[in-house]
């Protein structure tokens, strides 16, 4: 049980938190892991808070409940910190990753007494710079891989390049932007 | 050899459908089963199958179209959930009594009302007396495997009954997990060509389908239908054995998890079995003799086999993800206790759980085993008909 890495994603409908969780599951799957990627479905609307989950393990995973004591929490929209208990159940030896222009030092006091590691990444800046538009899930995915260590970063980059090449065969300019976003995110994610 | 992949339960069943390449698929969308015909429609549009895809205007029409197609001699399938299944109701009985081997992916969802899109088993439990064979699966793998086996079970000449492949809405249907897919050619060979004995489009043999059946023979036809359901038990085991030889994945009437020396056990269906297995492992590591039985074949009900599996246990909890509203217990509990009657003296309690998508955690399952251990120790049952994880 303890070998299972459990991750909870908080985002808003339409931002791609569910897609990011499925991309993470995909990436881990490609390195031979057992994976689960699933959203908590509700009456979703654009902008409403949503939750998605990942379990990643070297052994088969049989538990099919939501995740209540995650090792990691990823917050795709920082405004959720005020309205959703994003650190609920989050283990102190784990970490939270927040998409924000602020520093970890500025975010930490807002996390309702959470004592674990706090990481921040400015996914908006990276996305706009690399892709020309705001798609937070690529930068958040890369930051999550870096922080959780669920797979080797170089292996991840190689795998993503192959999958982008396949997915965007007719739009090579998109591949370059996405790859740049992944690499930049891995470098820029910072924590305390 | 098969191919390792990662798919949601619905994607996996749609892939099975593509590999089977049925003659007709008629369906109407309803959450959480919608993706099955949605993915399949794309396969049909892309020319990956020879199937005639019939997008109808309701579930009643979907099942009616399936009945028409199957009666004509076409291998036919569909998918639905909850109110969609309810809307098929009268046609479910007609499909079964006409002995038409239609295969239906029944993606379990709470039946309204109040309206709710999440998982429980109130939809397919209501259809348990409709004459359909019902298979239940814990994971996307089992939903996929059962769907492929369902074709062969349904079409067996000693059965000729429709089959429901039941799996949990969202928990299984929308969760992406690792799965082992069969090669297309292996599925094709496994299900074989559909050769019905009697069908309307047969130029060499005349047959009447769905006529008025007066008291002179109606009863005999129902008796034959009941016999077919009895035969299904043997055929399911034969088909499962053949599937095991092909894939190495073993399926029986139910799965016994750590039951060899178990003193207490829970009996349940579908995805919660996985969550409960984690609890069994935990208890076993502390030396507690806990076990689990996951029912795969609910119709026909494996009466004698269940009695043999539960005989001698100190306490058993049957978990129902649907209430029976009979004031006494859920549908699985009723079947288990009636199977045990006069054959084994086992203390059995019932928990209704997870209605309308109430999440079931390992902590919830621990509560059940704790209660069973108390019963095993004291020999006395405080309450038979219980609710798990309810706010009260």
Image (cartoon, coloured by chain):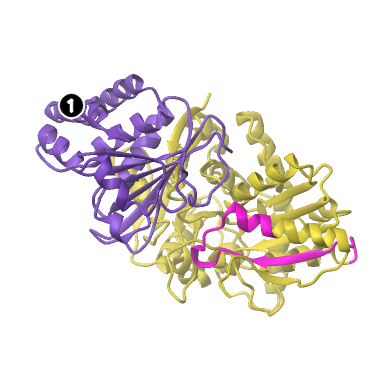
Q: Is residue B366 magenta?
A: yes
Residue at position x 63%, y 78% in the image: B325
Look at 52% across and 34% down and name the residue there: B187
Residue linked to disc 1 = A180
Label 1: chain letter: A
Given residues B391 and B77, the one toward you in this image is B391
**Viewer-closest of B270 and B374:** B374
**Taking A29 as reference, is B294 above or below it?**
below
**Which image quadrant: the C terminus of chain B?**
bottom right
Figure quadrant of residue A149: top left
Q: Residue A168, located in which quarter of the rendered image?
A: top left
Q: Is residue B73 magenta?
A: no
Q: Which residues are magenta?
A: B342-367
Q: Is the residue marked by circle 1 packed among few (<14), some (14-19), or many (20+) residues within 10 Å? A: some
Q: Residue at x 52, y 36 (%)?
A: A4
What is the drawing colour of chain B? Answer: yellow
Residue B119 in view (yes/no): yes
Image chain in purple: A
| Relative image position of residue A137 (x, y in whole percent) | 25, 41
* Residue B379, position as x, y percentages in the image: 88, 64
The one of A187 and B313 positioned closer to us in this rendering: A187
Q: Is residue B26 left or right of residue B2?
A: left
Give the x, y percent position of residue B221: 68, 67
Decide: is B279 above or below A29: below
Residue in view at x 25 percent, y 50 percent: A77
Does residue B208 show up? no
Quadrant housing residue B54 = bottom left
């Amino acid at each position: 049980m303890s070998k299972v890495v459990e991750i909870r994603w908080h985002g808003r409908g339409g931002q791609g938190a569910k897609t990011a969780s499925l991309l993470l599951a995909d990436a881990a799957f490609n390195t031979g892991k057992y994976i689960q990627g699933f959203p908590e479905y509700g009456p979703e609307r654009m902008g409403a808070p949503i939750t998605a989950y990942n379990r990643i393990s070297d052994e088969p995973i049989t538990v099919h409940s939501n995740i209540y004591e995650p090792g990691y929490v990823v917050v795709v929209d920082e405004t959720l910190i005020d309205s959703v208990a994003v650190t609920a159940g989050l283990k102190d030896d784990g970490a939270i990753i927040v998409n924000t222009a602020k520093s970890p030092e500025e975010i930490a006091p807002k996390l309702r007494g959470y004592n674990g590691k706090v990481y921040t990444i400015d996914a908006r800046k990276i996305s706009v710079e690399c892709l020309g538009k705001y798609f937070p899930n690529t930068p958040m995915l890369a930051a999550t891989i870096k922080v959780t260590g669920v797979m080797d970063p170089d292996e991840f980059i190689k795998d993503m390049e192959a999958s982008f090449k396949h997915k965007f065969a007719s739009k090579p300019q998109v591949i370059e932007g996405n790859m740049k976003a992944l690499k930049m995110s891995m470098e820029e994610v910072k924590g305390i | 050899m098969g191919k390792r992949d990662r798919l949601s339960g619905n994607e996996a069943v749609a892939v099975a459908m593509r590999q089977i390449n049925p003659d007709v698929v008629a369906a109407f969308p309803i959450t959480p089963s919608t993706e099955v015909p949605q993915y399949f429609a794309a396969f049909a549009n892309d020319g990956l199958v020879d199937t005639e895809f019939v997008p109808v205007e309701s579930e009643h029409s979907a099942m009616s179209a399936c009945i028409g197609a199957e009666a004509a001699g076409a291998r036919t399938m569909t998918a639905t959930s909850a109110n969609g299944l309810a809307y098929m109701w009268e046609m479910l009985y007609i499909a079964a009594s006409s002995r038409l081997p239609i295969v239906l992916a029944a993606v379990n969802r709470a039946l309204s009302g109040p309206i709710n899109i999440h998982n429980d088993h109130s939809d397919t439990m209501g259809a348990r007396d409709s004459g359909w064979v019902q298979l239940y699966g814990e994971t996307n793998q089992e939903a996929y495997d059962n769907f492929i086996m369902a074709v062969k079970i349904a079409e067996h000449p000693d059965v000729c009954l429709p089959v429901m492949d039941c799996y949990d809405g969202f928990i299984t249907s929308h969760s992406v997990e690792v799965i082992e897919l069969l090669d297309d050619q292996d599925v094709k060979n496994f299900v074989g060509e559909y050769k019905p004995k009697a069908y309307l489009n047969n130029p060499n043999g005349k047959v009447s389908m769905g006529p008025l059946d007066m008291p002179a023979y109606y009863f005999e036809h129902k008796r034959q239908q009941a016999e077919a359901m009895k035969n299904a038990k043997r055929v399911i085991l034969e088909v499962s054995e053949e599937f095991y030889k092909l894939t190495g994945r073993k399926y029986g009437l139910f799965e016994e998890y750590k039951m060899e020396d178990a003193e207490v056990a829970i009996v349940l269906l579908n995805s919660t079995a996985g969550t409960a297995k984690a609890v069994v492992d935990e208890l076993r590591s502390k030396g507690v003799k806990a076990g689990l039985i996951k029912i795969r074949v609910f119709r026909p009900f494996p009466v004698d086999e269940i009695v043999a599996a539960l005989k001698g246990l100190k306490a058993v909890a049957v978990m129902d993800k649907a209430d029976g509203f009979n004031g006494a217990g859920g549908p699985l509990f009723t079947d288990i206790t009636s199977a045990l009657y006069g054959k084994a003296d086992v203390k059995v309690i019932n928990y209704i759980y997870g209605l309308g998508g109430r999440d079931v955690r390992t902590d919830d399952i621990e509560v059940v085993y704790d209660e069973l251990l108390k019963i095993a120790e004291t020999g006395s049952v405080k309450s038979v008909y219980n609710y798990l994880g309810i706010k009260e």
